[in-house]
Amino acid sequence: GDSVTQMEGPVTLSEEAFLTINCTYTATGYPSLFWYVQYPGEGLQLLLKATKADDKGSNKGFEATYRKETTSFHLEKGSVQVSDSAVYFCALGRAGTALIFGKGTTLSVSS
Amino acid sequence: EAGVTQFPSHSVIEKGQTVTLRCDPISGHDNLYWYRRVMGKEIKFLLHFVKESKQDESGMPNNRFLAERTGGTYSTLKVQPAELEDSGVYFCASSQAGVSHYEQYFGPGTRLTVT
């Protein structure tokens, strides 16, 4: 069945550092891919998405590209801020079914 | 427009007691999902409603869990009797019907602690 694997955390960075959180998936066909973020004390928010191969999702300076050849959807940001400290979840979805999530990666950014 | 709301935000109960979680989806969203995250693990699917009907309940862990969605609006998830392993954060999400219905909007979650 479908599955998502994320890099283990926590990830600790200094402000303005470059961020990469790895995400790979196993799936048949062409699912949609998502990154969700959970800020402290809040619910899950959709950060970005990509619905087909080679699509790049972007939002708030974060980017991820749907790579079918490597079955990956790595999250990147060129310069992180303290306010980016949160838990990030990679997820896979298909029409009519529930999302499948990775374990989540906790990011802590210090000033 | 109001987002997905969940009540309570936190519940602490003893093993063997009953707890009922509530979710109010975004108005007009036919799809409603329940998920659970046990400490440090994946967010896992529990069940999916389309309006008032259960579309998929394959993720429900056992018959101690009962979900309902009255009139296709809010939903409740009852755990009876609660066990220690039921502790975790329960998320509710909703989405519209149609081509973009995989884009789900999540509530803040209910943190359940069973002691």
Image: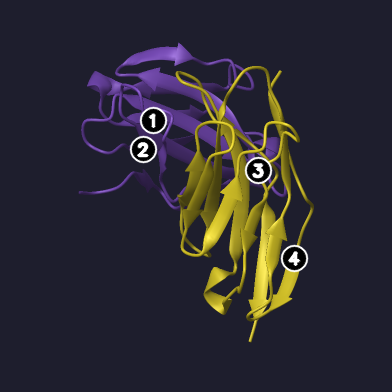
Amino acid at circle 3: Phe
From mark 2 to mark 3, how far is it between C-alphas?
A: 31 Å
Frontmost of labels 2 and 1 is 2
- Say what secondary structure mark 3 lies in: loop
Q: Which residue is mark 4?
A: A11
From mark 2 to mark 1, how far is it between C-alphas?
A: 6 Å
Frontmost of labels 3 and 4 is 3
> Do the residues at discs 4 and 1 belong to one chain?
no
> Residue A73, which numbered label?
3
From mark 3 to mark 4, how far is it between C-alphas?
A: 18 Å
The residue depicted at 50 percent of the width and 42 percent of the height is A49
> Do the residues at discs 3 and 4 belong to one chain?
yes
Q: Which chain is purple?
A: B
Amino acid at circle 1: Thr
Badge 2 sits on which subunit? B
Residue B15 image point, x, y percent: 64, 38
Frontmost of labels 2 and 4 is 4
From mark 2 to mark 4, how far is it between C-alphas?
A: 32 Å
Q: Which residue is mark 1?
A: B76
